[in-house]
Structure formats: structure tokens, C-alpha cells
Amino acid sequence: MCAVVAAHDGKRTRSRGRSEQYEDPDRVQTEGVPGLSGDEARNGGFVSVDVLRGRTAVVIPAVVALGAGIWGVDRGSMWHDEATSFTVARRSLPALWDTLGQVDAVHGLYYLLLHPLLALVSGPELGEIVLRVPSVLATGVAAAGVAAVAAHTASSWTGLLAGLSYATTPVVSYYAQEGRSYAMVTAAVVLATLFLAKAVSEPRRPRWWALYGAAVAVGCLLNVFAVFALPAHAVTLLVSRAGRVALGRWALACAAGLVPAAPLAWVSSEQRGQVGWLMRPGWESAADLVTRFAGTGASLVITVGLVVLAFLPRRPAEDAASVTPRLPLLALAAPMAILPPAALLAVSQVRPFYQDRYVLYAVIGLAWLAGAGLAAIGRLSRWNAPGIVVACVLLGATTVLALPSQADVRRIASRNDDPAGAARVIREGARPGDAVLFLPMGRRIVADAYPEDFTAVREVALTRTAAQVGALISQEIPAREVAAALDGVPRVWAIQRSRIKDSHLSTPQDLAKLRLLRDDYRQEARTRVHGYVIRLFVSEAAGSSGR
């Protein structure tokens, strides 16, 4: 891959019958070198080192990202949020629409996109793979887009390095294998940035502004927090002095893109109880975000070093004007890496909304900075072999250092819990006539996602399922009816999250369940799986026959 960089190409390119001189920011001065072509001589004695023409620099990162996404995509369990995606998106369209009117509207478009895909499968084993396919594909698109933006604003060599930096980042792989919308939001933001760069460099083609507005709309409909990418784009236009016309067109395109998302934002604001558990973030949250996005230890040191290199000033000859105006890559990268997380952290000081995954797309800014830093090594060495080797070695080093993290994100333990493991305990240990209780009822997501494992047990506290009530949590009987529901039941399974103590279960129904289990049953077995504890209770009246 690195060998192609040593070739030279100073040819002219043609577009729509016009001949334009190819300008590359990463070019080597070769004045006085024998054998220069006439075009090279007229261009001031520079030879482009960028021979990654066409789609090569874009395709390679996309392939790497797709490969990383496919590797280990079948973890064997859907964690809680993925199980929510799986169960909600499989509801009938009327039931799904009813659900979104009451809860989780912020993910409505994502569920609607998943609905036809999940209709193709019946069980959760294949379903968990199908559930993650859109995220895998979106990550491939995002990697290609990261490379395309860097190639358009800097060079194809920079694009290739930036795309590979993005594709090999562990947090990118994490969400490539996540059955949620965040990888798709990132892809939408990347495409919006690409269309913005195209719109500035081709001001006579309004289609790029239209495409920009469409990408903004899709990103915000997938998750309203994609809106924090817009201030980053505004800063990019300001610091690059794109001009009032470009700023005006950007504002109109933003407005057009936000109109479809406005109703979603309003409905979601009425459902903000869903994130009522979030706490106000502090400096620790900011530090965790940096290390999760940029890496830890040696990886973080290399990333910081590359960012510093990216901002090294170029020689005057390297800043020769292009035939068409272009946004500087650094003007795109730095605001995107900093502003969305900073904005979310700031907003969350007033109303806590902070989760780092809501601004996952900030990683693209880091990838552009890393790509620019690697390309700077080549420039500093005047694109001699040693500099090229150093750039490739650093990219390879970050990839190798990230391998343990890459392996970790493919393990079930990388997520909060293992519903499939909890369901498997019931399947392997339950007897006909056993009952099951969920503490609290929200833990019934285990049975929603893996219903076949619960065929041998009775859900004695259940009245209506979450799908029937158009909610995420099923409806259960009143507390006063719990004793009657368990009357004569010799064995009861209780499923709850391992991080929640009995003292934290405070609803009347949960208190009634706990009181009955304590007074009329004894615990016979206790099994822990990741994120869950499953206990088997045997009736005191059953005596030894209940064992």
C-alpha cells in the first residue's frame, strides 16, 4: 500500500470538456530535477505524490471497516438496548406507531428501517446478526466518507490514512456491531460533511446544498443529537472564510434539513423521562470520552502526537492556491472532534442528556486529524522512503496496539448485560409448572427477546405485554394480587439485574414479590450471568418434594 506513494503523476485532468491542472496539497518540490514534463515545469516544479486516483483511497478503508464489522458480529447475545431494538422493530406497524407515540420516538426512524429486515427472520439467534447488519454497512459508508472528505480537501494519500485510522478505531468497531442507530448517525454526518465540502468547492452546483440538507435531515431523524454537528460545520465555514454566500446557503440548507426533524424533537422532548436516570456529567465523563474515542496508553500518545503534527505549518510552496476553493481539512476536523462533545457536555449541565454514544460522530474529526498528522510525516521527509515507512509504521502500531481492545468489544462482557445467558438458565433449569418473576418488570426484556426459553414457565405477574400496551415495559398485576397469583406454585424463578439490590426495588408490585418470596419460599439456587442474577425459590410448604 505504501509503495504506491513513491510514484509520481503530474498529469492534467479533464472535466466536461475543460482542462484543469490537478493540484495536490501533498506534493514534492522537484525544481531542477531532470525529466520534468512541461506541465510540471509550468506548475512551478512540483510533482504530485498522490497516485491513489479514483476510488482506491476510498474503497480500501471501506473494506477494512466492513471486515472489522463482520469479525465477531455474532456475539451470541443481544444486550438490553439491542434487545429493545429487536423486540420493538418486530412489532406490527400499527403497534410500532402506537409505541412511538408514547415512548422512544427518538429512535423511531431506526425502528422503521429495521422492521422489514427483521421480518425476514424468526428467531433471535439469526435476528441478532440481521439486527447489526445496518450498523456494519453504515460503518463501511462512514469509513469511505471519511477518506473521501480528506481526499477532497487534502489528498488521496491523506484520505487513505484518515479512512484507515477511522476503520481501525475500537470504538468504531464497537458501534459497528451494535443494534442501535449510532453508526448510521455517524454515516449521515460524514456524508453531510462531504456534501458541504463539495458545495464550497463547486459553488455553481446547488445540488450539493440539497444533498447536505437531506443528510442533515436523515442524521437528525435517526438521533436528534446529530444537530450538534451543525455548529461544527458553521465554525468550519467561518475559520476557512468561505464567504457570506456560502454561509447563507449553509443556513438555508440547515433549515431545510431541520424542518423534518422538528416534530421528532418536540415529541422526544415530551418523552424525556426515558433519560431521567442520566446524571450531570463532570470532568471524569469528559476524560472517559477522550480515552474511549482516542485510546489509552501508547495509542493515546501516538494519537496526540499525530494531532500535533497535523497542525504543523506548511511551507509557502505547499499552500499554493487550488484551481477551485476548498475547505481546509483541519478546519473540518478540529471543530468536529471538539464541538459536538463539548456542546453535549455543556447542555447536560442544565438538563442531563449526556451519553458519549450520542456524539460518536466526533471520532471522524479525530480520524481526519490522525490522517493529516500521518501525511505530515511524509511531507516533512519530502516523501522519501523513510518518511513513508514511518507513517505506515505509526498507523500499523496504532492498529496493533488496538487489537486487545478490538477483541474485547466483540465479547459479550463488553456490553452491560447478557439477556441470552439469563434466558438460558431458565431453559436449562425450569420444570413444567414453575413460575417466573421479573424484578422489576422491565427485566422482562429477557423473555421478550428470547421467548422460546420461557415456554416451560408461567409469567404469573404479567397482564399485558409491552407490545400490547404500546410501551417498552410490560404491564403487571396489582400488588394485592401477587399472593393469589403464586398460590400453590412450588418453584419460582426470580430474574433481576445483578447491580440492583433488593432494597432498590421500591414499587408496590416489587415489594409484594420480595415479601412473598422471603416469607413463603426459601432460596435454593443462585446463578449469575453477566449483568443478571437468577434465583430459584422453593416453597416452604412443598418441603423436600419441591427440590
Image (tube, helix red, strand yellow):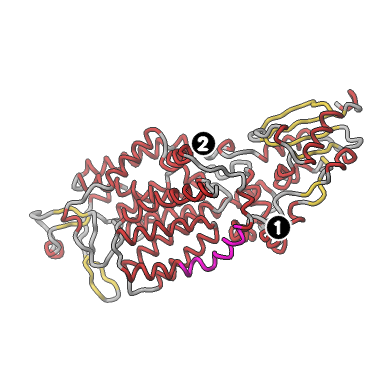
- Magenta residues: mostly which secondary structure? helix
**Magenta part of the chain:** 255-269
Q: Quadrant of residue 244?
A: bottom left
Q: Quadrant of residue 416?
A: top right
**Which residue position holds label 2?**
408
The amino acid type, in three-letter code, at marker 2 is Asp
**Which residue position holds label 1?**
91
Q: Earlier in the sequence, mark 2 or mark 1?
A: 1
Q: Position of residue 454 (x, y in %)?
A: 78, 42
Q: Position of residue 495 (x, y in %)?
A: 74, 36
Mark 2 nearby-residue class (10 Å; few <14, some 14–19, many ≥20): some
Residue at 80% over, 43% down = 455
Q: Is residue 337 visible?
A: yes
Mark 1 nearby-residue class (10 Å; few <14, some 14–19, many ≥20): some
Residue at 67% over, 61% down = 101
Inter-mark Cα distance, 2 to 1: 32 Å
- Drawn side of residue 192 relative to residue 419, left or right: left
The amino acid type, in three-letter code, at marker 1 is Arg
Indicate the secondary structure of the residue bearing disc 2: helix
